[in-house]
Amino acid sequence: MNKLPRFLLAGLLLVATAGVASAQNYPGKTIRFLVGFAPGGSTDIVARMIAQEMSKNIGQQVAVDNRPGAGSAIAAELTAKAPPDGHTIFACTTGVFAIMPFLYSKLGYNYEKDLVPVTQTGSLPYIIVLHPSLPAKNVREFIALAKARPGQINFASSGIGTASHLSAEYFKNAAKIDLVHVPYKGTGNAMVDLLAGQVVLMFDQPVSSMPHVQAGKLKVLGITTSRRFSTMQDIPTVAEQGLPGFEAISWSGVCAPGGTPRPIIDRLHTEIVKVLKVPDIRDRLLRDGIEPVGNTPEEFLAHTRLEAQKWSKVIRDANVKVQ
């Protein structure tokens, strides 16, 4: 077996020693937690829970910094350009890894090189909500109705290329139905028109739609998880209603800049998973339709790669284009 040259071996030892030393002194100042969306959304809510609890545990402040715009690409680029010392972390999402790289020819970050996965924090299913003006009571009835009215039923999304849009495109393809897409600038605007009956269907997260369902203003047809959600057991999955294998999940996680030493990644992972195991936090997330995860960096990386394969295919099959 060939031996490494002394200078190379010394260099490797120096890098490893520096990483350990930096981890021992970490964190040495406030941690900036970038969120690519405005305050109040699910990604922001999860980030603020983590930041508040981590600040109590690590002896330094974890400060959420909202940098909305471009589907979180602005915050991703800021993360990519930040020093890889663990003092900048990022609330990364499905869009950052699995959607935008396949929609845009130019991004300010490389999702494979510039972002290091720490852990997936949450899994966020969608529910299919329908305006009461349509008679369908479940997924099977809606598919039958859509097949009887090809190109006549519309659906809303929070914007072209968003996870809610692509989940509906995935559903269209699986069900072999023709629906008309009506994109909006954000979920709030789409919900206003859905409640008014200007559009009739939307894939939305439970935290924003369930109050309207409970008030009788919308109907819920199904949930996009592979199995029924623990806090919404009365909502059947799309898969069990005639589309076996169907699953459309959005997710959030924490990433660090590329090149962040592994000992620091491990420390971040330990602290974030500790937060996700706090009973009050776990219960609140589940009530909001967010399933806590807390997997290893390797498991999270593998998940992002599978998601990139899945959603890039949906984008190609639906011929989704952005202006």
Image (cartoon, rainbow, N blue to C red):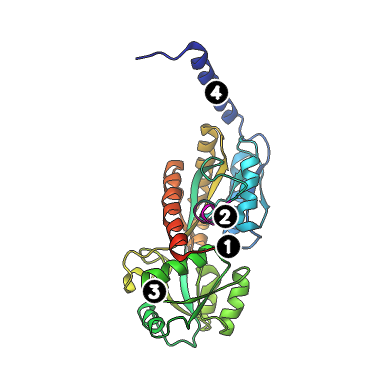
Residue reaching furthest to the top: 6
According to the picture, the residue beneath numbered tag 2 turns out to be 104
Q: Earlier in the sequence, mark 3 or mark 1?
A: 3
Query: Are the residues tagged 1 and 2 within 8 Å (C-beta)?
Result: yes
Q: Residue at x 42, y 56 (%)?
A: 310
Q: Earlier in the sequence, mark 2 or mark 4?
A: 4
Estimate the spatial distance between the alpha carbons at disc 1 and disc 4, rounded to whole Å.
Answer: 43 Å
Q: Residue at x 43, y 76 (%)?
A: 178
Query: Are the residues tagged 3 and 1 within 8 Å (C-beta)?
Result: no
Q: Earlier in the sequence, mark 1 or mark 4?
A: 4
The disc at residue 15 is: 4
Give the main secondary structure, helix, strand or loop, of the magenta stretch: helix
Estimate the spatial distance between the alpha carbons at disc 2 and disc 4, rounded to whole Å.
Answer: 36 Å
Of residue 276 and residue 320, the one placed in the foreground of this image is 320
Estimate the spatial distance between the alpha carbons at disc 1 and disc 2, rounded to whole Å.
Answer: 8 Å
Q: Earlier in the sequence, mark 3 or mark 4?
A: 4
According to the picture, the residue beneath numbered tag 1 turns out to be 322
Query: Are the residues tagged 2 and 4 within 8 Å (C-beta)?
Result: no
Estimate the spatial distance between the alpha carbons at disc 3 and disc 4, rounded to whole Å.
Answer: 54 Å
